Amino acid sequence: MKFKDWIESFTQVVILLLFFVAGCSFMVPDNDDNLASYSEGFVQLSGGKVDIADVKDINIYFKTQDSTTIGTCYRLANVVEIDPSYFYQSTPKRRVELVFHELAHCVCYRNHTEGKLKDGCPDSLMYKTYIDDQCLKTHWDYYLKEIYNGCEK
């Protein structure tokens, strides 16, 4: 585990502990049915690298994010939050991009990438920002295979 990953995990633990120590109840909403089908799709498209047990404990729901965030994975809490405004204004491919990106953080422990393909498009759905429509269109099949790198059991 890289130091950066360790710090991120440690920070999440501290935040969770603060909720409990302060007497706050950390209530997580139930899964959103509109998003549950994306979890199932994540499993089905994985070619056996992810199974239903890997995603069944992840609670995925809509929650408004800050102005620069469209989705968040809290690995230690098994929670994925998706910004409803961004989601419902997005194309179907953008919705898959967002949900699969967050699930890959939580299920496969993937981090952001910064690499580019030869044509300048991001090298992964794990890219640090969202991917433009032309790159999604051109590399969609590649992205749907690459997202599972590191998910091997």
Image (spheres, rainbow, N blue to C red):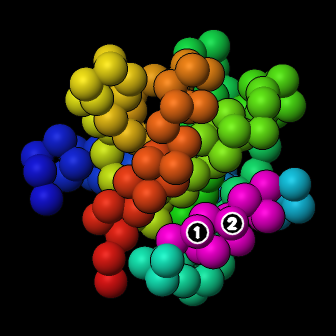
- Residue at mark 2: 41
Q: Residue at x 17, y 41 (%)?
A: 4
Q: Main secondary structure of the magenta part?
A: helix
Q: Is residue 33 above or below residue 118?
A: below
Q: To which quarter of the image does residue 88 belong?
A: top right
Give the residue type at disc 1.
Leu
Give the residue type at disc 2.
Gly
User: Callout 2 environment at 10 Å: few (<14), some (14 to 19), or many (20+)?
Assistant: few
Q: Residue at x 29, y 65 (%)?
A: 150
Judged left or right of residue 29, residue 6 is: left
Residue 45 tag number: 1
Q: Is residue 25 above or below residue 126?
A: below
Q: Is residue 19 above or below residue 41?
A: above
Tags 2 and 1 in contact by the CB under 8 Å rule? yes
Residue 139 place in picture, x, y as percent: 48, 37
Q: Is residue 10 magenta?
A: no
Q: 46 and 11: which one is in front? A: 46
Question: Which quadrant, please, contains the N terminus?
Answer: bottom left
User: Callout 1 environment at 10 Å: few (<14), some (14 to 19), or many (20+)?
Assistant: few
Magenta residue span: 35-46
Element under disc 2: helix
Residue 100 place in picture, x, y as percent: 57, 51
Question: Which quadrant, please, contains the C terminus?
Answer: bottom left
Judged left or right of residue 71, residue 92 is: right
Q: Is residue 58 above or below residue 129?
A: below
